[in-house]
Amino acid sequence: MADLVNELVWSHSRSRAFEGCKRAYWYAYYGSWGGWGANAPAEARAAYVQKKLTTRAMWIGTVVHRVAEELLRDARDGRQTPTLDDVVSSVRTRCEKDVRESADGSWLQRPAKRVGFREHYYEEGASEADWAQAIDEIERQLRGLWTQRLFQRLLAVPSRIRELEDMRRFAVGDVDVWVVLDVLVDDGRGGVVILDWKTGGHHDDAEIRAQLGVYGLYATAELGIAADAIVAMHVNLRHNEETKHAVGEAEIALAKETIRDSTARMRALLVDVEQNIADPGAYPTLDPGSEDCRRCGFRGICGRR
């Protein structure tokens, strides 16, 4: 197997990280690099472990997305759809295992495959009731997903699903871009519908539009879909709400501009653009006492614990 190479590949999540704390960005994309190896330096290993940490809110979204993907993939591949009660029972068991392995520290044996929570790692004092409430919220959203009209439509015509949480890489000028669409489905009329599941209590409409604009850019550039034949839907499973977003020429042009400008700012901090080498000194920490530090997974290695 060829050695992994640390490349600067643009993504919506990487752009968001860069616009936040620069030092946290450096830990995520440079300081943690190679930290998965058995002989990794202690600092790289610590950064890698802290990069893998999640929170209850993030975990809820991950679990719901994973189950939606599994159910739709089974339907698309011709496997029988389980009953809702069976799904819920299986998911609750998996979730309880996640919490248990994080609490006892056994997740550290395989941080890439198991779940570690910031609440345990930083001893934030989450109670058993907090964890039970989180698992109950996962069940509530899964039951809502089950009856959601767009999800039911996908189960009825699974052959129209073209992409399902598939990681795609494409070029925008001299920049490579990663996208992962929750669902991309043919509309039966030569166009596509992009579905984006959301599970949180609040989402910024401008940010959602920007993310969907990048997805629209991918659909036009890589799949040859006309901009006016793309429909993008943001589905909030917490509140059972659907919002349709325009993905036309203007949104796609804005996505291109955003990618170019964002990448230029990232490259400007590099010591060596060709080799994607970054010096931590170019990535300052936030001012002491920042509220963002209290929520950051890297606060241990950063000295803000």
Image (spheres, helix red, strand yellow):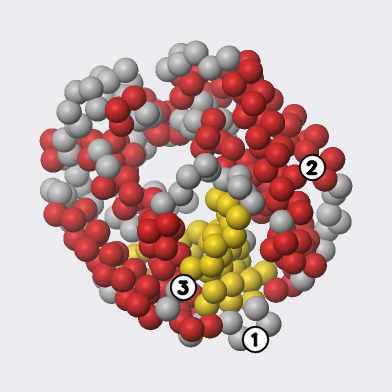
Q: Position of residue 143 (x, y in %)?
A: 75, 45
- 68 and 243: which one is in front? 243
- Seen in the image, is 244 located left or right of residue 206? right
Marks 1 and 3, how far apart in space?
18 Å
118 versus 17 height, above or below: above
73 versus 120 height, above or below: below
Identify the residue at horizontal 67%, vertical 43% (top origin): 141
Q: Are marks 1 and 3 in contact (CB under 8 Å)?
A: no
Secondary structure of the residue carrying numbered label 3: loop
Residue type, mark 3 in image:
Ala
Residue labelled with disc 3 = 246
Identify the residue at horizontal 61%, vertical 86% (top origin): 190
Sequence order check, earlier mark of 1 and 3? 1
Secondary structure of the residue carrying numbered label 1: loop
Marks 1 and 2, how far apart in space?
33 Å
- 31 and 297: which one is in front? 297
* Disc 3 crowd, CA 10 A, few/some/many (<14, 14-19, 20+): some
Q: Position of residue 218 (x, y in %)?
A: 44, 72
Between disc 1 and disc 3, the foreground one is 3
Residue type, mark 2 in image:
Val
Residue labelled with disc 1 = 189
Secondary structure of the residue carrying numbered label 2: helix
Asked if residue 30 shows in the view, the reply is: no
Quarter of the rendering occupied by the C terminus:
top left
Residue labelled with disc 2 = 87
Residue type, mark 1 in image:
Arg
Q: Position of residue 180 (x, y in %)?
A: 50, 59
Identify the residue at horizontal 80%, vertical 34% (top origin): 89
